[in-house]
Amino acid sequence: MRKRDRTPKTYTRLTHPLVRDSREEPFRRATWEEALDRTARGLTAARGAFGMFSCARATNEMNYVAQKFARVVMGTHNVDSCNRTCHAPSVAGLSAAFGSGGGTSSYEEIEHTDVIVMWGSNARFAHPIFFQHVLKGIRGGARMYAVDPRRTSTAEWAESWLGPNVGTDIPLAHAVGREIIHAGLANEAFIERATTGYDDYKALVEPWTLSLAEKVTGVPAAAIRDLAHAYARAERAQLCWTLGITEHHNGTDNVRALINLSLLTGHVGRYGSGLQPLRGQNNVQGGGDMGAIPNRLPGFQDVLDPEVRRKFETAWDTVVEPHHGLTLTEMFEAMDEGTLRAVYCIGENPAQSEADADQAVRRLRALDFLVVQDIFLTKTAELADVVLPATAGWAETEGTTTNSERRVQRVRRAVAPPGEAREDIDILCDLAARLGHDWKYADAEAVWNELRSLSPDHHGMTYARLEEHQGIQWPCPSTEDLEPTYLHGRLWSADPAARGRLAPFGIVRHDPPVDLTDEQYPIRLTTGRRLDSYNTGVQSGGYASPLRRGESVELCPEDAERYGVVVGEEVRVTSRRGSLLAPVWVDTALRPGLAFMSFHFPDEVDTNQLTIEANCPIAGTAEFKASAIRIEKVSASGPALR
Amino acid sequence: MTAIPLGVPRRLVEFTLDGQEARVPEGSTILDACRAAGKDVPTLCEGDTLTPKNACRVCVVDVEGARTLAPACSRRAEPGMVVRTDTERARHSRKVVLELLASSVDLSTTPSVAQWIKEYEAKPDRFGPDAARVDEEPRVDNDLYVRDYGKCILCYKCVDACGDQWQNSFAISVSGRGFDARISVEHDGPLTDSACVYCGNCIEVCPTGALSFKSEFDMRAAGTWDEERQTETTTVCAYCGVGCNLTLHVQDNEIVKVTSPHDNPVTHGNLCIKGRFGYQHVQNRD
């Protein structure tokens, strides 16, 4: 067995702009003047075929300016971010049900609830400090149910662990719904008052008996019944989910299936009762709130609403097109069709984060012009024509970010950026000026105040108030008062006018994963995060974690025995899209036929060569959670081919 | 339908503190009342995010009618109580506690302790050089944090932070009894063989610097650690979407330590390994 180097590639900061005349040449150092001129030329040439990848890691202020750049300077709604690869289905599902894409409750409420359902979420690893609030709740007497194909470290704290087969969340949710209805535990008063489509929902879930669900999901009927009764009988209950729900080809449907349960029981719109999608990037909530998505203007205001458009047209002195732009996923497809020819990529690493990474790289290479603005020379930046060195949002700039509980918090500059690195907003404004738009922002607060003037949900959040309250949760329309910590209390109002639009049940059907397992690819591969690492590892590879043991393909002990492989042994992992070598790790949290990998070490083991780009038609998120693979022992003699 | 629970309204408790009338909300401790009145009562094992353990006894006060001195950090204020913080008995007790601690433990990195030793005229040296209890080298078994048990006063705060009060990892515990009691991980092995998840929430609560960032440990060893030259800036973590507030301690444009505000609604002073230690990437500058 070959010794593997456990130290991941470490990236050093970009300190000056890089340019090149053709993709065959290496980069050469350039002045800001030259780099920006080249960028302006590249973008001008591709007007009408332009896409902006904004950054879910940067501040709200930066995202506001980036989407304004796309909409005003380039005249397109083609602006999106890596929200598309994680929680876009949550935003789509919640908006469809409630008209707003945020989680409905707050961290503190989970400490004061009775039942907590963690569905497709290993928060103990992926959101450790959120999980401390869960632990407070459990210590206070709340019962937690973990629903996850893997028996994760989150499940260790559960009253009961339900381990469905990957991609059977809808049958499981429907069976829970049916059991609640049949046991007479549905909250009829709430359903009558606040929801629509109940009859259709009832008919939809009727076939999903406990025994059928057990057959399809693999979860014992008694456990499903137990979850249904615990959730429905609780005075207060929180339903939390992460990417185990959203990273499927029908992620939005999965989200709707969970929301249905909250509508059925009235576990939404009250203190301690709500829905909590746990967001994966420091500002992925804020990026969407700021309009860095193709269908919403800042303040999550609908592009298709003429009054909203008029407001922005007046404020920005421009024409806002009355249609949606392309999502990140659609932009990648448009690259193939040749209708998207230039991309401005800020702080994202799609060459390694997209499903089917080889295809993503091929598409990025085919662009006429690619400008990447980042703090590192990432794999995506290596494909660019111009690379612009930026500041690290969280430690080198002033601004705000918005967390999973909709709390807008101040980000502050603590260290000076290296070399010639510049703030994203300054770079964007310099480019806008070269393209004929003279924007003057004295500082981040000036950007924020422009946003406040346009977004009612953020209007009351002055920097001074954000400081005073240690962050404020949206909506915050008033500069005097604070709103409740939970959303949609309106649904409980006795007055129909105050109740507003009723919440529709989602009529969604089971649709198994696209990448089927068969004789050739008998193992289901699912992906996720590890405690000490993060995404493509560009950031988290930079510190010496004692927990890090590099990438491996994790198998259950039974499968390891079946394939005759041991911990550390390198095996070939092959899907219908790609093949790679990875060492084996044995994890008792898995079961026969289920393997696990993360995507934290793509320079070592590029897991996304295996994953499938089967996208949710509504939100555009790929099915990272379900690929079919096979494991092959690499012959002991002779080196394995990479 | 439930509104926001406000809790039971808290009555005010009136009692006498050093001859002055004090009014504090029911449930407050004597220490809370002292702090509200601007009195400096020394504390070591008390932690604002933890349940009092009454381990160090340095905060004791005189309660009229009580046989023994009471620890201000955990004794709740009661109506009509007469409390004196500055009696000869209380001062003498604190002095002896400081002498015992300072003679057996290295308190060189414990904030304020030098000033208290002066104030209470404590003479730790009177027990002689043999009083040192733990005589061992600091344990450097990973790149993130260092355990120097020669500085440990057995306050149990790290045990509580790692245990059921916050982190629930239970990597740290007390082993041994009586004079042999000490803080340890399982089987007294290296951290890397323990249940530790490197959240550093034990460092956050350690009052003496027995647990410290390796960056701080190395800089102190090199003589370059200088808190006078450090700035503290609170920002938001760059990793997941939970939104933990980080206070970056920066010296010469390098992040040297990360803490979190204890009154922050998201973190209550706690972080995970990425938030606490995952900052190096921004300063990989060449």
Image (cartoon, coloured by chain):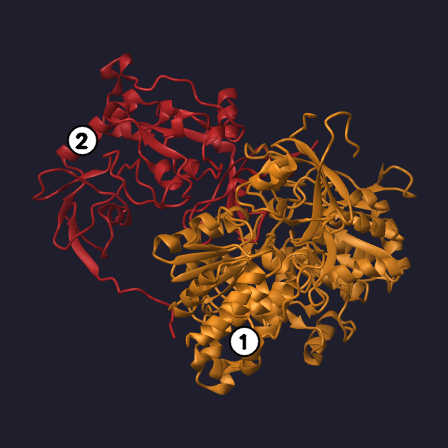
Chain colours: A orange, B red
Q: Is residue A496 above or below residue A253?
A: below
Report x, y in % for residue A250. 66, 64
Q: Secondary structure at mark 1?
A: loop
Q: Secondary structure at mark 2?
A: helix
Q: Quadrant of the N terminus of chain A?
A: top right
Report x, y in % for residue A374. 73, 46
Chain letter of mark 2 equals: B
Mark 2 residue type: Ser
C-alpha separation, residue under disc 2 versus residue under disc 1: 73 Å
Chain letter of mark 1 equals: A
Tell me the residue at 48%/80% (across/down).
A191
Q: Is residue B43 visible?
A: yes
Report x, y in % for residue A186. 44, 76
Question: Is A627 or A516 nearer to us in this picture?
Answer: A516
Mark 1 residue type: Glu
Report x, y in % for residue A496. 49, 86
Q: Answer few, some or many: residues within 10 Å of disc 1's Cα (few below 14, many 20 plus, some between 14 and 19).
A: some
- The answer to the question of whether label 2 and label 1 lie on touching residues, with beta carbons closer than 8 A, is no
Residue that protrudes farthest toward the bottom in the picture = A496
Residue that protrudes farthest toward the top in the picture = B129
The answer to which quarter of the image holds residue A541 is top right
Q: Is residue B224 above or below residue A433?
A: above
Q: Judge left or right: residue A539 versus residue B147.
A: right
Q: Judge left or right: residue B285 versus residue B255.
A: right
Q: Quadrant of the C terminus of chain A?
A: top right
Q: Judge left or right: residue A29 versus residue A427.
A: right
Tell me the residue at 50%/80% (across/down).
A194
Between disc 2 and disc 1, the foreground one is: 1
Question: Is A510 or A280 nearer to us in this picture?
Answer: A510
Q: Which residue is mark 1?
A: A206
Q: Is residue A460 visible?
A: no
Q: Which residue is mark 2?
A: B93
